[in-house]
Image (spheres, rainbow, N blue to C red):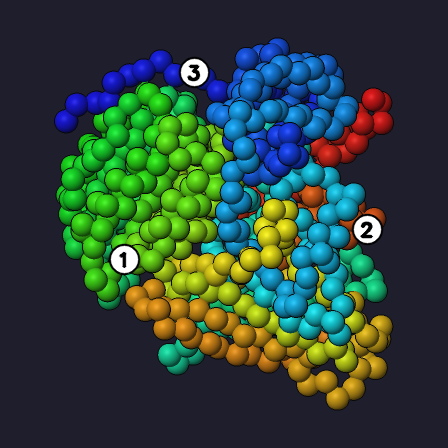
Amino acid sequence: MKSLPAILPVLLICLSGKAQYYLRGEIRDQWNNPISNVRIMLQSSGYLYYSGNLGGFGITLPHEMDSLSISADGYYPCTVGVNATQYQTIIIKARFGPAPKPLNRLMSLTKNLSSEEMNRWTVGAETYSSLVENEFLPASKYPETGFAININKASYSNIRRFLNMDNSVPPDAIRIEEMLNYFHYDYASPGGDSTFSFRSAFSSCPWNNNNQLLFLQISARKANMDSVPSANLVFLIDVSGSMDLPNRLPLLKSAFSLMVNNLRDKDTVSIVVYGGVNGIWLTPTSGGEKKKILESIAQLEAGGSTPGEGGIRNAYQLAKSQYIKGGTNRVILATDGDFNVGERSEDDLNRLISSYRSTDIYLTCLGVGMGNYKDSKLEVLANRGKGNFAYLDNEKEAEKVLMEEFAQTIYAVAKDAYIDIRFDPSAVKRYRLIGFDNKLNALADTSNIIQGGEVGSGHTLMALLEIEPVQADPDSVLNINSFAKVSLHYELPSSDQAHLEEYAVPYHFCNFSELPGYYRFAGSVALFGSLLKKSRFTGKTSWDDLLKMATESYDPNDVSQKEYIRMIEQAKKIYHRNRKNKKLL
C-alpha cells in the first residue's frame, strides 16, 4: 500500500500564550444574521482563524491594534482594522439572499417556557459565546424541566489545553456537564434488569448561603465484555494538510494504535481517509490481525484539502456494507474539524449527519489540534450522529479515552436518553440547571425539541441544580417526603422501543460539608466551570474558595483528580493576572 502524497501544509498554529490582548467579536451579514465558518486572517502574523457557530470569534493578539482579512464563500471579502479593547461586530455583504434556517436541537428544555421568555435572558449578555447560561425559573410556573444525557467529555480536556498554554478559556468552550462527565464518581450498579441506577443528595449551596444544591447521580449498566457482540468499527481519519502537526495526525496514529490492543478476533476494523486521497485505506479486517492494522495506521501521511463530507459518506457506506445485526456498528471520526471542501458549515453538517440518524450506526468524534480546531462542528456531528465526543490534547488523554474507557466510548447501553424532573412548588421556589446550556440560535427557534444522547457502558452522570427554597430553614419544611420526581427516558441500542424509569427525590437535607466526598468534588467541578465562565451566579466566590473545596474532597490516588487541582491553581494565576492587566488598560 502506498503512502499518501506528502503535500506541504500551511501551518496554522496559535499565538504565544504570553500575548497580552484577547480580541472578541462576531461576523454578521447585512441582514444581521450571524455567519459561521468565516475565514479570519490576522494581518500581523498571517495565522488563520474561523468564526464559530454564532459568528463569534476570539483571537489572542500581541498588540492592541491589528487588522483582519475576512472572507467566506458567497460573501464579498474585506479587511478591517480592530482594537482589542473593544468588542468587534463586523458586517460582510452577501452575494446572494439569506439561506433558509435549519432545525435546531436543545440540550435542555423547560416545559411551557415561551421563546419570548427565553430570548429575554440574552438581553445585555455577551454575544461572543454561543451558549446562554440557564436562568433561575419559578417552580410554580415552570415545575418541569429536562436535559439530555451523554458521555461527552471534550470540553474538559480542551479547557486543560488552554490553561496549559497559559491562556484564559473562551466562554463558548466551557460546557459544565462535559466537565462533570470527565470524572469517575462512586459507581452504583443497577439492580435486577434495570439499565440505570439512581441516587440523589440535597445540601446547602457553597457559593450562595440562601440557596441549596440538588445532586442527581445516574449510573449506566456495565456491559459484560465476555458476551458483548461483535463490533464493526470504521476509523474515519482526516489526513489533510492541516493535520500535519505533532498534535494532530501523529497523535491520532498513536491513539488508534493504542485502541487496536482492545480489539477481539470477532471484531472488524476498516479505515477510511480523506485529504490528498479520499477513500478506503484499509478494507474490513479482523481485529485479530493487529499487525496488519497497525502497519496500515503507521503509513498514514498528511496532505491536501479537507473533503470531510465525502469522507463521512464513504465511512457510513462502508459501515453499512459490513453491518452486524445486534452488534456494535460505529464510525470513529478523528479530525481537527477543518472541513473546506463540500458540506462545511454546522447547518450543512447537521443536515448531512441527520440523514444517517435512522440507521443503527453510531458516531464517535475525536477532536485534535489548536488554532483552527472546530469544536462546534464536531459537537454537531456527535450529537446528531447518536454518538459521543472527546478532545485529545495529548497521548495520555488518548490512552484514557480509547484504552481505559474503551467500553464506555465504544459500547452503548442506551440511546436517545434524557431526563425530566418535576419539582414540588410547595418546597421549591425557583431552580437553575447548572450546565446543559443551549445555543442562542436554538433558543430562538420555536420548533426545537430536546435531543437525547448516547450512554456508554458503566458511565455515571452527575447533574446539579441550584435551588431557591420556599422556606429558608430546611428543618421548617414539613410533610415533604419527595420534593421532586425524576423520569428517565431512553431506548436500547438495538431497539426503537421507548423505556421509562421513574425515581422519587427524597427531601433529605444536609450541610455541604457533610456530603460524601464525591458529591463535594462534583460541586467543585461545577464551580470551576462557573468561575471560568465568570458566571454571575457564583457571586463573590473566589478561586481560593474553590481550591479549598476541591482539595478537601478530591481523591489523591486518582491521577485525573490530582491534575484537576493543578489546573485550578494554574487558572487562578491566569485569571488574576488578566484582571490586573485589564485594570492597567
Q: Residue at x 24, y 55 (%)?
A: 231
Q: Quadrant of residue 280?
A: top left
Compared across the picture, whether 164 is left or right of 8 comes to right
Q: Hey, what amino acid is under mark 1?
A: Thr
Q: Position of residue 72 (x, y in %)?
A: 51, 24
Q: Quadrant of residue 203?
A: bottom right
Q: CA distance from mark 3 to mark 2?
A: 45 Å
Q: Of marks 3 and 2, which one's residue comes earlier in the chain?
A: 3
Contact between marks 1 and 2 (CB within 8 A): the answer is: no
Q: Which residue is mark 3?
A: 10
Q: Residue 26 bears which disc, if any?
A: none
Residue identified by numbered label 2: 539
- Residue 522, placed above or below residue 163: below
Circles 1 and 3 in contact, beta carbons < 8 Å: no
Disc 3 on helix, strand or loop? loop
Image height of 234 relative to 455, above or below: above
